[in-house]
Amino acid sequence: MLVQPLYAAVPAPAAPSSVDPIFLVGCFDAQRYPPMFCPNYTRALADISSEAIHTSFGEDIEVLEIGDWFFLLDALTQPNVLGGVISVRQGLYNLSALRQRELAGSFEDGLGLVGIHAVAYWPFSLGLAERVFPLNATKTSSGKVHRNDVITSRHTHVKVGENEINEGLPDELDVADAEVVYSPVPKDEGGWMPGEGSITVLYECTTAIRDGTVPSIVAYERGSGRSVTFAGLGHTDAPGRYEKDLFWYNHSLADPVVRELLGNSVTYALKPLADSLEQRIETSEEYVKERIGELEAQIERGEAAIEDRERTAIMTTVVIVALSALAVLGIGYLGFRGTDTG
Amino acid sequence: MAGSNLRGYVAIFLIVGVLSTSLVAITWIWRERGLRTLSLSGPDYLFKAAQGTATISITVTPETELDALEFRFRCLVERDMSELSLRTLRASSTEDLADAWPTVRDRLRYFETIGAREHVAIHDVSATNLEARVVLFDFGKIYSCLFDDEHDNESLTTYAFLLNSTNHIVGCFEGYSDYLVARELKGELLRRDEVLKLVGVQSGDIVNEFYGREGAEPSTQSLPSWGHISFEKVRVDEPYGVTLIAKEANMAPGRLLLCVETFGDGIWYPDSSGYWIARTELV
């Protein structure tokens, strides 16, 4: 025997609220399909992003964690989304052409993105590795593995260029880094460079290949979009791994320099967008109104039809009651007139 | 004297007649008009030859004129609750449930940021073929408004909780705005063209048929996207319906939640909606 539903009424705001600007964070392990959400890594990155955004731009921009890969890709194309952190470990499937086209288009129209690891790995992200996270990586390099109390691996990165992201930070980073992705085009041949846009290499990894370096953190501008790509910071929340080593997911994120780099990257990527926030919100409101306007109109029509039916029913009921009362009075008058006086 | 009495009796008889006729007329006027369900059936098992052909079928007829009649199909696959990091296993309100599953909470929050939260369909219903409650969080309609048809069925759009009589969560489902999906033995998700043999769409006397992968044209791939079958300017007392016939196949053992919800002019008709928990097992 079922109990009565406790909540037949659905709580919802009485009227549509205004559109809010948001920044999305989602980290996934793409060894599985669909890519598996990494909640611990996402939470850690969301905290870093929130702190950076609220410090630099105030409380207006909300940071949301997104736990579904396709929903993240969907949401990043919406106009109220200013940007996001996308981290993918081990991209073992091919991103569809539709998704590449949409994300690259949204980026050029004005998204601030921070990409980690396989988002720059060409076999996974294809066009995005050229147009959004421009490392065009086709090779991977595991870090040097240390098997002491914890299982980890490390890569060393040296500062190359300097901008607001790495200003004042150490010239050399030695961070827990499971894997770095890179392009095999040799540096002395100019390395791989995107055809369009402006790229700044901030750090190079000295331990990815023998006798050479590869770009490991790059800042990029194309159209109205800005991105910062981290070739390393491979991570996993995979079942089993977390149980064996409680801190596995955030070895690299526990490093204060890495945290500062990530926070600065978020600020850098969002900076031009934050200046035009008001206009962006207006555009978003128009977009949402246009998209869900027909749905709202349909519901309004349905509710109006029900109200109309109720009004007609009330009128008809009044008429029936009035006529019945008249009939009863008439019948009573004619039927009982003079009965008692006989 | 006798004539007066007779007149009185006749008057009483007539008054009773007038009052009862009025009462019947008023009751008829105030009856709930909308949709009459002609058939609503779904399976307990799917993809299992021994159980015969598995069909999901709904047919309704409007009792009043409607601009739009829509059947929304959803198919959800059960998730292992131990993988979901649920924050509670007992819920006393819809908010509790939404908070229990972070993915649902994130989705709700996201749609709130674009002012579309009120269009998330949250329906608390009894399962049609099981003594349990289903609480459905359906983002499919908003998805279909915000995203182009090219996105059809790549993103999860619908989540559901199965609750027992003490409000404990006994099952969690996630799924798509699609007619039918299922996971095969290796876990790969099979879509409508691989699991549906035939789909019949009835509009009045006309029935259009759509065929699965091996069948003739038109194929099930050409069915309307997002699992939404709509009729415009529907006529009173004409039948409108959809029948899905599933294929037999080897699927991963588990449970699916099959839903068909009926909307007239955007208003949900719970009595013309079905929610079936179907087991999938090896043929």
Image (cartoon, coloured by chain):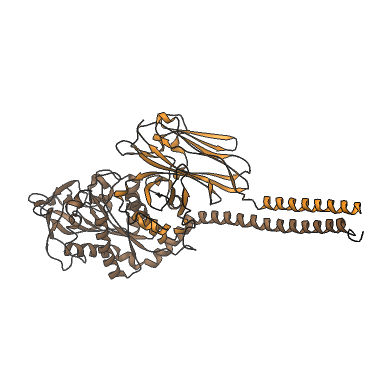
Chain colours: A brown, B orange
Q: Residue reaching furthest left? A: A211
Q: Position of residue B19 (x, y in %)?
A: 75, 53
Whether residue B202 is visible, yes or no, is yes
Numbered disc total: 0
Q: Nearer the viewer, residue A241 or B200?
A: A241
Q: Could you tell whether B136 is left or right of A89 in the image?
A: right
Q: Residue at x 47, y 54 (%)?
A: A5
Q: Residue at x 61, y 54 (%)?
A: A305
Q: Position of residue B15 (x, y in %)?
A: 79, 54
Q: Could you tell whether B15 is left or right of B246 in the image?
A: right
Q: Nearer the viewer, residue A323 or B189?
A: A323
Question: Residue A165 occupies which quadrant of the picture?
Answer: bottom left
Question: Residue A279 occupies which quadrant of the picture?
Answer: bottom left
Q: Nearer the viewer, residue B270 or A266?
A: B270
Q: Nearer the viewer, residue B272 or A179?
A: B272
Whether residue A191 is visible, yes or no, is no
Q: Position of residue B20 (x, y in %)?
A: 74, 51
Q: Could you tell whether B11 is left or right of A205 in the image?
A: right
Q: For the C terminus of chain A, which image quadrant?
A: bottom right
Q: Residue at x 14, y 61 (%)?
A: A160
Q: Position of residue A105 (x, y in %)?
A: 34, 53
